[in-house]
Image (spheres, grey):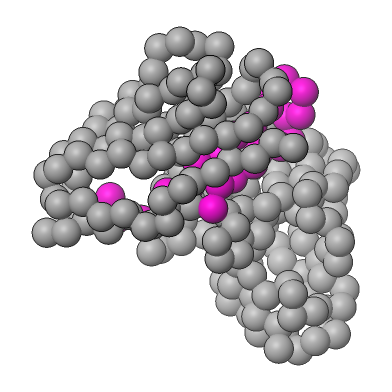
Amino acid sequence: AQTVTQSQPEMSVQEAETVTLSCTYDTSESDYYLFWYKQPPSRQMILVIRQEAYKQQNATENRFSVNFQKAAKSFSLKISDSQLGDAAMYFCAYSPWVTSYDKVIFGPGTSLSVIP
Amino acid sequence: NAGVTQTPKFRVLKTGQSMTLLCAQDMNHEYMYWYRQDPGMGLRLIHYSVGEGTTAKGEVPDGYNVSRLKKQNFLLGLESAAPSQTSVYFCATGLAGPYEQYFGPGTRLTVT
């Protein structure tokens, strides 16, 4: 079965510091997408970053970057220069887009607090 | 543009009552999804649609029905609500499947 694991239910970071959120997944597929979604207290789900498995280069979006280790099935999110607005739940998600375009499997989430 | 909207935002039901949640989008996306979010479990797919007039089951479809009579609307129905259906429900749309999903603001449903 395809699963997504986030082993850190809660994390905290000082403002302006860097934090890394962990995610591992289990799949037998070779082509898939990986995502990080942010859910602030407003409850709105926002796509932070996306990685295509066939791309070796790690995705980056401004202060957000990922460390994608395909062989290890690991997909961590690094937030640099943390800001108060980064406080949110972060969900890692996986989609086997080649075989099942309808399926997106979400991890349980990591709650990130930013300390002023 | 409103993006993806959900109606209502909050609702309290008694066990056995029925209701319909409406998801509306103005982005002309073909794909639409209904998820439920429960504490500690992330989001789970209930039903989805790949175009007007089509629907399909997701991971947790039991107790729910859906309809997509118009491209811009995706309805989620609960025929006989149960306390286990207490959750936050999210609608999402996509231009090309899960590649980039746009989420609505969610509906918090409580079944007593």
Q: Where is residue A8 in the image (x, y as percent from the top left)?
A: 41, 51
**Residue at x 62% of width, y 22% of height:** A32
Q: Where is B17 relative to A109, above or below?
A: below
Picture coordinates of residue A81, whole percent (x, y): 16, 39
Please tell me which residue lies in front, B61 or B71: B61
Number of numbered discs visible in the structure rendering: 0
User: Does residue A102 show up magenta in the picture?
Assistant: yes
For the C terminus of chain A, give its image quadrant: bottom left
Q: In this view, does A95 lie to the left or right of A87?
A: right
**Residue at image coords 38%, 25%:** A67
Left or right position of B76 against B9: right
Q: Can you say which quadrant of the picture contains the N terminus of chain A?
A: top right
Closer to the camera in the image, B8 or A19: A19
User: Is residue A49 toward the left or the right of residue A18 in the image?
Assistant: right
Q: Is residue B38 magenta?
A: no
- Classify residue A98 by image quadrant: top right
Which span is picked out in magenta?
Answer: A85-108
Residue B65 showing in the rendered view? yes
> x, y percentage for residue A24?
52, 35
> Could you say which quadrant of the image residue A21 lies in?
top left
Report which quarter residue A3 is drawn in. top right
Identity of the residue drawn at 77% across and 69% down: B20
